[in-house]
Amino acid sequence: VQSKMTDPGFFRVFDFDFRSGKPFTDADLVNGNHCAVITASLSRRLFGTEQAVGKMFTMNHVRFTVAGVVRDVSALTPLTYAQIYAPYSCFIKDEQTQRRDNLMGPFTVCMRIPSGGGAAVQAEIEERNRLYQQMHQIKAPNYCYVQPPCPLWKYNVNGRAMDQDDGAGKALRLFGGLVLVFLLVPALNLSGMISSRMEGRLSEMGICKAFGATRRYLLGQVLGENLVLTLLGGLVGLLLAWSVLVWGRGWIYGFIFPGIYLQNGPDVLVTAQMLFSPWVFLAAFLICVVLNVASA
């Protein structure tokens, strides 16, 4: 199973849906208690039910008590994905070893920052780091690198790489270019298709005009017909896209993000909430309407 060592604040920073129980407490973290929050699917595998609070299981020859059961988290969110969440203090056995060179290991701090507050938080972190180096008389200028605060989506796109490369910017430029190509090709095809259809209907247009049809009426008829076709085509395309993302989830996400999601196993949880975003759908629909109107 995939496990994650964390603290109680983790369940306050990120939104977890508890099916039963609650997160382990600060006292559990301080005392190093062997308790854990597990996912609903793992709870059903171990105990046959999601109501598993107080039950015990063994992981790496250590007995843990279930504190809570949460809805499964998708591997597409690697910062929060796991099947078992336990206090990190459970495995800190030798403080002298852990504190060698004043380092505690690869810990990650996540916090909710109000919109626009990233620069202030980064400045405070850098100032505290400067005071820490001054207090301990550390002269190496690059002793500690502070990654600038960034939105969660950008952190995931960067692949959690602690470097200066703008992975999110590169990914956006790459996928943005692909989107433009994928929009340009159907736009050209659509224009050619509508043009050929109109040439075949010139006699029909002429008869309508002979019987008093105005330019506005004819233009409205063409736009209306193409809008109906756009709606039907968009619905079919949306269903096809969802089908590919659901049935091909074992390979498509690994193809787009190699080395990040394949390590979590071939079964990637995909929910309806992840597949449908009203704003993304509205933006894509408006782009299709603009292309349709321009072509018509």
Image (cartoon, rainbow, N blue to C red):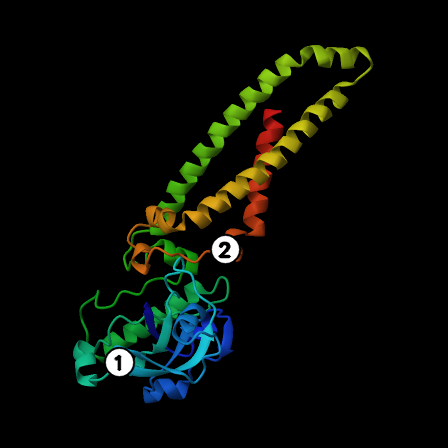
Q: Is residue 27 visible?
A: yes
Q: Quadrant of residue 108?
A: bottom left
Could you say where residue 154 lies in the image, as x and y percent from the top left? 40, 55
Q: Residue at x 47, y 28 (%)?
A: 185
* Residue projecting furthest to the right: 212
Q: Nearer the viewer, residue 273 or 243?
A: 243
Residue at mark 2: 274
Q: Quadrant of residue 99?
A: bottom left
Q: Nearer the viewer, residue 149 or 259?
A: 259
Q: How far apart in space, not on screen, are marks 1 and 2 (Cα)?
A: 34 Å
SS at badge 1: helix
Q: Which mark is residue 235?
A: none
Q: Is residue 107 left or right of residue 54?
A: left
How many numbered tags mark residues here? 2
SS at badge 2: helix
Residue at mark 1: 91
Q: Is residue 135 left or right of residue 7?
A: left
Q: Is residue 151 visible?
A: no
* Residue projecting furthest to the front: 48
Residue 22 sits above or below residue 191 on the image: below
Could you say where residue 139 lies in the image, as x and y percent from the top left? 18, 71
Which quadrant of the rendered structure holds the N terminus?
bottom left
Q: Mark 1 and mark 2 in contact? Answer it, CB < 8 Å.
A: no
Mark 1 or mark 2: which comes first in sequence?
1
Within-10-Å neighbours for mark 1: few <14, some 14–19, many 20+: few
Q: Which kind of residue does numbered mark 1 sit on? A: Phe
Q: Residue at x 40, y 70 (%)?
A: 45
Q: Quadrant of residue 64?
A: bottom left
Could you say where residue 234 lies in the image, as x and y percent from the top left? 57, 38
